[in-house]
Amino acid sequence: MIGVSVLGSTGSIGVSTLDVIGRHPGRYRVVALTAHSDVEGMLAQCRRFRPDLAVMADPGAAARLRESLQAEEMAAIEVDQGVDGLERAATLDQAGTVMAAIVGAAGLLPTLAAARAGKRLLLANKETLVMAGPLFMAEVAAHGATLLPIDSEHNAVFQCLPAGFREGLERVGVSRILLTASGGPFRELPLEALAVVTPEQACAHPNWEMGRKISVDSATMMNKGLEVIEACWLFATGPERIQVVIHPQSTVHSLVQYVDGSVLAELGNPDMRTPIAQALAWPERVSSGVADLDLFAVGRLDFECPDLERFPALDLAFAAARAGGTAPAVLNAANEVAVAAFLERRIRFTSIPEVVAATLEGMDSEAVGDLDALLDVDRRARERAIREAQKRPL
């Protein structure tokens, strides 16, 4: 039995992870679950999987969960809270595998803790690499952690690369990584209409079921920009070797081009259970519950070059990747603030990249120091982004 901790278990990735685990009761055992404040969701998961530990980041939610577990005679499940509780869930001895699926910067500390504990780390929290790429990869190497990507695009690239790719793509004959993107819900919307789109429209992704923040990032294509930065760290390369390709069908999840002209691609239905199952079982394979891909039903595969006038966030992310240092952390912090303001109907959709650009322009990129220095950069970037958002009311 493989013990698994699921960080962010009530989110979309966490729910999909538990769906895959539930299909293999003789292979995996859930030892820890964590969430922010969704007590009902956590309680339902505790009923089914009976973990050793359940953690709520919010202390009030932890108290309510503890009472509910006692009322349902599940007091044997220990309840913890806060950042310390999240880090504890990430480092339990009985958890050989950790799914890092907490959304946003909140996932940084527990994901780092899992790396320091030498875990088999399934990384769905892209912000860890965007914010702290050099620090995180150093911890992975120093403590012998096994890092497996969960984002569908990075997982696809991982499947298409040969062993030894982390020693340098040129050494294994790779010329380019091509990350595919659906283009989101506004790929064909007239540019003048973007200023009045609603949060509900932005969250209505045509192909994938995702959380609200990630759905907005997909609509702006900031999600793909963050994935470019993430790919640089995962695959030991620079942004000059990465190309983004719009692929509306979301059937080809990414491609790897080799110097001999070969291009390898990973295809499948747009369902996150596929990369989750691949990483959970790697180097073996297990069923994921995803339907077989019907190429006759797909019918055609289209590819387009991204329109940077429509998707300025993608251009900002490439610029931050080239700048390096703390620029990606500033980009991520400003984007989180701007997306939250949009979802709360305080700024327009088109103001999201404006807030990010103004924040980047107002903060010089610095060399990445220690974790405390990086968290200070994140704090200052958020404060500046809040001020920039206030300048752009609806």
Image (cartoon, grey):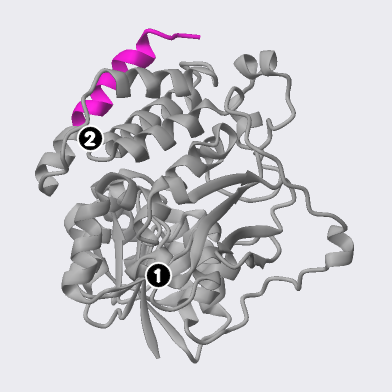
Q: Is residue 385 above or below residue 99?
A: above
In the rendered view of the protein, which quadrant contains the N terminus? Answer: bottom left
Q: Residues within 10 Å of mark 2 (few under 14, many from 20)?
A: many
Range of the magenta residues?
379-394
Residue at 35% over, 69% down: 166
Q: Which mark is residue 378?
A: 2
Q: Nearer the viewer, residue 264 or 136?
A: 264
Residue 392 vs residue 53: left or right? Answer: right
Residue 263, percent from left and from top: 64, 64
Across and down, in percent, residue 36 comes to 35, 50
Q: Give the number of the mark in front: 2 or 1.
A: 1
Disc 1 target residue: 171
Element assignment for label 2: helix
Can you tell which quarter of the image residue 137 is in? Answer: bottom left
Q: Amino acid at mark 2?
A: Asp
The residue under the point 40% across, 77% down is 50
Distance between mark 2 and mark 1 Cα atoms: 35 Å
With 144 as the anchor, is 2 left or right in this view? right
As rendered, which of 332 and 202 lies closer to the eye? 332
Q: In this rendered view, identify the residue nearer to me: 369 or 82.
A: 369
- Could you tell me residue 372's position as x and y percent? 10, 44
Q: Please say if 97 is above or below 297.
A: below
Q: Nearer the viewer, residue 106 or 63?
A: 106
Q: Is residue 13 above or below residue 167?
A: above
Give the secondary structure at mark 1.
helix
Q: Is residue 332 visible?
A: no
Label 1 CA crowd tier, 10 Å (few <14, some 14–19, many 20+): few
In this rendering, would 57 be left or right of 43? Answer: left
- Residue sitting at x 68%, y 35%: 185
Residue 321 visible (yes or no): yes
Q: Is residue 386 magenta?
A: yes
Q: Amino acid at mark 1?
A: Arg
